[in-house]
Image: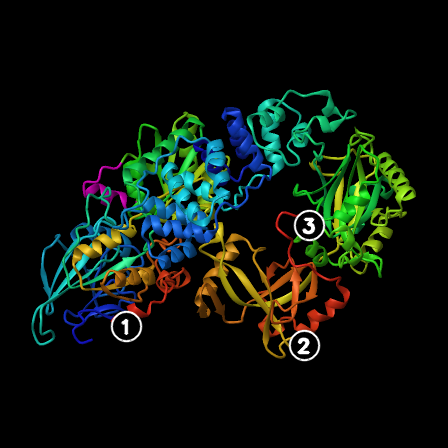
Amino acid sequence: MPSDLLINTPDGLYCPAGDFFIDPWRPRRGHRAIITHAHSDHARLGADSYLCARSGVEVLRARLGAGISVQGLAWEEQVLVGDCLVSLHQAGHVLGSSMVRIEALPGPRASTRSIWVVSGDYKTQRDCSGELMQPVACDVFITESTFGLPVYRWEPRDVTLAAINAWWADCAREGEACIVYAYALGKAQSVLAGLDASIGDIFVHGAVDKFLPIYRASGVPLPRCERATAEGVRASLARGAGVMVVAPPSADNSAWARSLARKGKGLREAFASGWMRVRGPRRRRGVDRGFVLSDHADWDGLLSTIAATGAQRVGVTHGFTGVLTRALAERGIASWELKTRFVGEGEGEAESEIASETAAEGTRAPAEDGQPNAAGEEHDA
Amino acid sequence: MRRFVQLYEALDASTSTNDKVAALVAYFTAAPPEDAAWAAWIFTGGRVKRAITSTQLREALIRATGLPAWLVEDSYEHVGDLSETIALLLESRGLAHEHTPTVAQGNEPSAMSLKEVFEGIILPMQRMDAEQRVHALGRAWGMLGAHERFVFHKLISGSFRVGVSRTLVVRAIAEAFGLPRAMVAHRVMGSWKPSAQAFAQIVAPATTSADGGNAPSQDGLNQDGSQPYPFCLASPLEVSAASLDAALGPVTNWLAEWKWDGIRAQVLRRGESIAIWSRGEELLTDRFGELASELHALPPGIVLDGEVLAWDAQRDKPAPFADLQTRITRTRGPKPEELLFVDVPVRFIAYDLLEHEGRDVRARPLRARRELLEGVLHELHMRSGSASIGTSTVLHTGSWAELATLRGQARERGVEGLMLKRADSAYGTGRERGVWWKWKVDPYTIDAVLVAAQGGHGRRASVLTDYTFAVWSGQQPGTGELVTIAKAYSGLTDDEIDRVDAWIRRHTLAKHGPVRSVTPELVFEIAFEAIAESNRHKAGLALRFPRIVRMRSEKRPHEADSVGQVRALLGASFGASLGASPGITPS
């Protein structure tokens, strides 16, 4: 439709009026890219220039390399890009994650003023970054739907973090080391910030370590921790200290993890993810504990955020797209499924440390897994 | 209930046997005896009659949460377990929806005991009509905490399962109360009513009767003398015929018998009564009334171990298990006047004697028990000429090689292979390695093409693990079209499952509800025990116990087997039964 501010192209979501992409999955020479956050399915190398939230600049550089041309915007600061006013608003997903507000000014391309907001990924809880998502009023809202089923509902984060500490304290008493597998960017820092350092010594995997100076520099209080090595872990255990290792999910079953201690022999493992809410995935991971900790909105968070934007049309991307569009239709909100190549919170595989096209292809694409919804698709037409 | 749920979660979360036993020991030590009784009962296979249907569960949920039915279904499809889906949705209700919940209660653990849950909620619910049940369920939800509801749903829907074997539970009770395992194993056999008194009897200090030689029926919980013994179980023998001598010693140290494909059963002839127990501890006496009446001619104080078989009288060999199944699904055996017209005659083949003249003889060597057994059966035949009761044939051979040759004839004889029992062994409790071996014939295998897949249940809910396989409809590979022949679920590692899952998602041709048809490209080797004509699959054949052996990545789909080739096996195969009836374990 001619009035659409964003169109879905093979290279990514594109704004013709502003001539820029949002989180393009195939950035090229000559492209300008606005990045909602630095997870690998949203931030890819190849565009000429990048724009993101100021608190996310260093995170993006850590991901894409120091050589990229990137501009940081203060929260809610408006800039003119082409014929559009663009501003970034806190999404609360990870440090420096934003929702992109695009306002088309009346002109040759658009006859009326219209506002679109692209959510990227978001959650309604405040995490260690201190940033908190605020719904942004708009006409059209593009939302994620990673946990778009009513079985997904989160406890307050403090409760989950307290449970992690209680488990660590139990293991420490038994003289066993703990590993929590959590995404290297965002989740791992949330876990670290919540740890009670009086229980013992804290170690991190290199992929997690990489982002710690950035979090610290932005004022996030993180406990003292060192790179995990077999010697370090053994020395702490020998002293009778508790041991906690925070590592990315890709380290599960790796030679690295095995070098620290043997599974079932002095090593207890846990996985921190929203998917741990359901018993099947919890058991499938084969870890001792599953802690329900997510950087995405739960079902209630999705519905309340969408309602708060006041949007008349809602585009639903990665996750349970079919379920959410149908639920919105029942609430009288026009919605459609938007096929993207974002993968949301995979069961550990999606957020691979190696961001690549093939990785995105190889993982389950939840966007294709939603229930087909005729009503939703009609709105798209 | 809180303690029981913690136990359930501990058992569910751990894969270590020691952790599981430790959790059980802690539970049985701490729980009040009336709760411990219910736990012991349910863990040793006690079954609660389903108190509610899944439709009624859904209805009550929709009423309580105001969620639309489609959303409940979508949630269920994702979670893969109705008990869990409902518990999760209940825990979240009110947050997600503006509807007023009919039961406005918190998610905190309740103060109800396990006994109260069973006797105050579940048992009364069984006697209610549908409307009352839905109301009772709403009340129960109000009383139970979030984690308790999941286990509660498992209990009321009759699908309670947790990864502990009876052996493990017996071991834990024995450990907790300092008793011999065999004694606990015996005491929890048969059907008994869970109560504080029953549990007190299970954990009562050891009496001399457990050592054998005394009247064992006095020691159990079944007052009517129908207390069965724990079954001795066989382990699969996985050594080549050539190394049998090294592994098992001289063949003469062993009693060899055919391995029957029937229902393992224990016959108890005590006092005035007869009881036939299945290995799943179900009373089968009424289902095989004609056997029971013939067995009545045995003198009191006899317990036999053996197999119930459907019998093909014309060919004088066992009939397919499927025939036997028609007898299991009936609730009552034929009336005496119908006996002449029984369409599926059955036989009881005895192979061991556990009680003789009212004494427990399990500790005696097998050879001696076998002699006694033959004497008992000989007398019975002299007295009543009963045709349906027999003893298993002992296969006398001079060498393992000879025995291996006999094993090669298993299929044409309608048996699954051979049983090897150490001649000097006492009758074991449970699966004691080295006492009984089952030496089955090798399964058949075919190569088939993956054509469809759907999500699994439970642990594998979100992954596509249930595969449908097809073979070529013609005589030769690659001829005709691909027609379905079997569904198979297991046999792949988690890693392989993940890779195939990813492949399926990228090669989905169409979705029909939860089922995806896929590009026919991957070839798998499928193993199965037997084959039979069937209209269940398009190939017109059905396989018994199909499972995936491995992925044949080196094979192209046109190299997969054809119906013609599979059919050729039909001649060699001995009929098939398609799965066992629930609760009855074919041995």
Badge 1 amino acid: Glu
- Tell me residue A278's x, y (percent): 41, 48
Q: Nearer the viewer, mark 2 or mark 1?
A: 1
In this view, which residue lies farthest toward the front?
B337
**Residue B152 visible within the image:** yes
Q: Which residue is mark 1?
A: A378
**Residue located 40% across and 48% down the image:** B86
> Which labelled disc corresponds to residue A326?
none
Are dots 2 and 1 on a single chain?
no
**Distance of label 2 from label 1 (alpha carbons):** 48 Å
Q: Which residue is mark 3?
A: B332
B587 is within the stretch colored magenta: no
**Distance of label 3 from label 2 (alpha carbons):** 47 Å
Q: Nearer the viewer, mark 3 or mark 2?
A: 3
The chain carrying label 2 is: B
Residue nearest the observer in this picture, B5 or B105: B105
Residue numbers of the magenta segment:
A210-222
Report how many numbered discs are placed on residues in the image: 3
Badge 3 amino acid: Arg
**Residue located 80% across and 31% down the image:** B361
Examine the image and state in which quarter residue A142 appears. bottom left
Q: Assess whether mark 3 and mark 1 are in contact (beta carbons under 8 angstroms).
A: no
- In the image, B269: left or right of B396? left
| Local crowd size for mark 1, using a 10 Å CA cut-off: few (<14), some (14–19), many (≥20) | few
In this view, which residue lies farthest toward the bottom?
B480
Which secondary structure lies at badge 1?
helix
**Distance of label 1 from label 3 (alpha carbons):** 58 Å
Q: Which residue is mark 2?
A: B476
| Local crowd size for mark 2, using a 10 Å CA cut-off: few (<14), some (14–19), many (≥20) | some
| Local crowd size for mark 3, using a 10 Å CA cut-off: few (<14), some (14–19), many (≥20) | some
